[in-house]
Amino acid sequence: MVLKKAASFEEFKAFTLAVVAGKRKVGPDDPKIWYEPTETAGPDQGVRFRSLEAGAKLLSAKNRALLRAIAERKPRSVSELAAMTGRADQNVLRTLNKLAAARIVRLEKGEGRARRPVLTTRKVLIEIDLLGAR
């Protein structure tokens, strides 16, 4: 069996209803990160973090503001997003590459050499077993 660490909120809903109905029990291989994809997410979209600390750092208030700008203002390029948010182009690109690796955004081909950031995940819920393995 493949360990699935992330699943969508739709899967979370079905999972929770099955547990409440007594049709299944929560197992050690069940997902620990639940996410809600946007309409632009691919079929195998799933959020991935190297660690809880990396996820918390990546989802900082400053980076969530960047994600909101992508969702609400739909920039055509990384440079346009940087200008919108008052951050340096290289800083924004570095952050977007990390968000893309976590599958929270996707960088699509834009005009010329530009890459257009697209939000692929709307919500992230992380489950932590405080007494589990270290």
Image: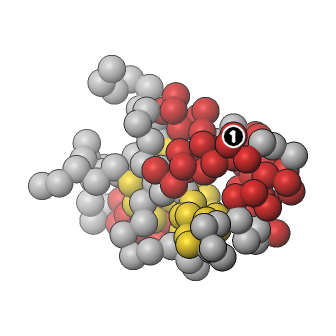
Q: Is residue 132 above or below residue 67?
A: above
Q: How is the image coloured?
A: secondary structure
Left-right relation of 52 to 1? right
Is residue 77 shown to the viewer in this render? yes
Q: Nearer the viewer, residue 118 or 28?
A: 118
**Residue placed farthest to the bottom in the image?**
39
Residue annotated with mark 1: 91
Mark 1 surroundings: few (<14), some (14-19) or many (≥20) residues within 10 A? few
Quarter of the image for residue 88 reads: top right
Q: Is residue 64 above or below residue 119?
A: above
Q: Position of residue 78 (x, y in %)?
A: 70, 58
Identify which amino acid the numbered label 1 is placed on: Asn
**Residue placed farthest to the top in the image?**
134
**Residue placed farthest to the left in the image?**
1
The residue at the point 17 percent across, 54 percent down is: 2
Q: Quadrant of the N terminus?
A: bottom left
Is label 1 in a helix, a strand or a loop? Answer: helix
The residue at the point 73 percent across, 71 percent down is: 76
Q: Nearer the viewer, residue 92 or 126?
A: 92
Q: Nearer the viewer, residue 94 or 14?
A: 94
Q: Position of residue 35 (x, y in %)?
A: 51, 59
Q: Quadrant of the C terminus?
A: top left
The residue at the point 36 percent across, 69 percent down is: 44
